[in-house]
Amino acid sequence: QTTDVSPQPSPQPETGSLLKAVIKASTLEGKAPLSIQFDASNSTGIDATMDSASWDFGEGAGFSATGFKQDHVFSQAGTFTVSLKVQAQLKGQSLQDETSVTIRVLAETEPDPSARVKPEVALALSLERQQLEQSRAELGIDAVAFATTQSGVTTLVSTGTISQSANGSFSYVSDRTDALELKFSDSSSLTYRFQNLNFDLSQPDGQRALRKDHNLSFRLETSEGTKVDISLIQQRGVYQKTIKGILVKDGLAFTVNTLTQGNVISDINPPGVDFEVKESISGSITATGFSLELNETFAYHLVIFDNAIEDVKHQFNNRWTLEGKSFSLPNGLIRRIFKNAKPVELDNWTISGDVLLNGSERVGGLNLEQTVSSLDTVLTIEDQKRILFSDKTF
């Protein structure tokens, strides 16, 4: 014998609780200009074809919109509260619910706080320092020469703006008197504020000018956020380079204070060139939870007759700490040889050195990896790789 039993009705929620505003944002943080896609279609109790959603993007009057999906660009840095209000009709009642999210828009030059220092950045920071001393200084001299030529004057011009067009050409305007700014077609920029600007004006470019005696000091500011004071002094073949300030790498700000001392061994003028330098590097690069002590030597030998032969040797005995871990690279060596800017004499290339944890445990090292089109100098630490150089073979 069976008995039909009717189920008891379950308690019904309040009508208003059936409506809940939900914001889905493509990101909550990034650098200006920051484009974000907002979506309210996951809100409960609504029909996107009949009900409504309104947005306030927290930037003041005029920055609002309606519709369940909205794209919005935050052009200025700051912290913004984005509010959403959804409205629906249910059983003859007009319902609404509200919610909000906080958006943080970083200045273009502000380091990304979500980035973390990785142990393999240690050598990359040292090589970045070298780029500032050499390539950025060379470019600064070239920029002054260009601005001077474009101005049509006899004295050096170290202020104004040099802009690169989409086709790669450059133009100059004397629109500022406090610095010389270079604006590139990829939206990056470099700003030079020169204090001393003495170099051999007879040299054809910045690279060759820095091989002769000079006295150059300037503050360099980049669109990535680097702000450093650089001094380069060479007299009778003996030189000294210093860098002090903030260096931005991998979205993080590092305090750099380094000293490079060296000698020009040989420099024969055309028709042949035999240029050789040897130098030592010391100092520190630090950030929160990170400290790098530099102990390096660098040698560069260039011979130009029928061909240009370059022999580049960089030795490392650096130590660094990261979040309580102590790393070291004793006897690290990167030696690369080029003929007309292409790798040659691969048997003489040496990429070697072990990274040690607490002075004894091997956790990585330097090695050379060959691809179809390049030779890559790679630093590996705790299974994390960083390509320090990628030299094209053709």
Image (cartoon, rainbow, N blue to C red):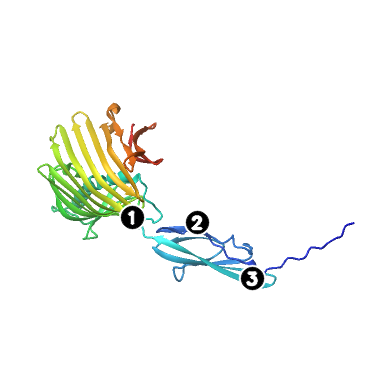
Residue designated by label 1: 288
Q: Is 61 or 137 nearer to us in this picture? A: 137
Residue designated by label 2: 26
Q: Secondary structure at mark 2?
A: loop
Q: Position of residue 155 (x, y in %)?
A: 13, 53
Sequence order check: which comes first, mark 1 or mark 3? 3
Residue mark closest to the camera, 1 vs 3: 1
Which residue is painted at 39% across and 32% down in the image? 371
Which residue sits furthest left?
A: 236
Q: Is residue 100 above or below residue 120?
A: below
Q: Quadrant of residue 46?
A: bottom right
Q: Which mark is residue 16?
A: 3
Which residue sits furthest right?
A: 1
The residues tagged by marks 2 and 1 sit, at their Cα atoms, a distance apart of 29 Å
Residue mark closest to the camera, 2 vs 3: 3
User: At label 1, which amino acid type do we have?
Assistant: Thr
User: At label 2, which amino acid type do we have?
Assistant: Ser
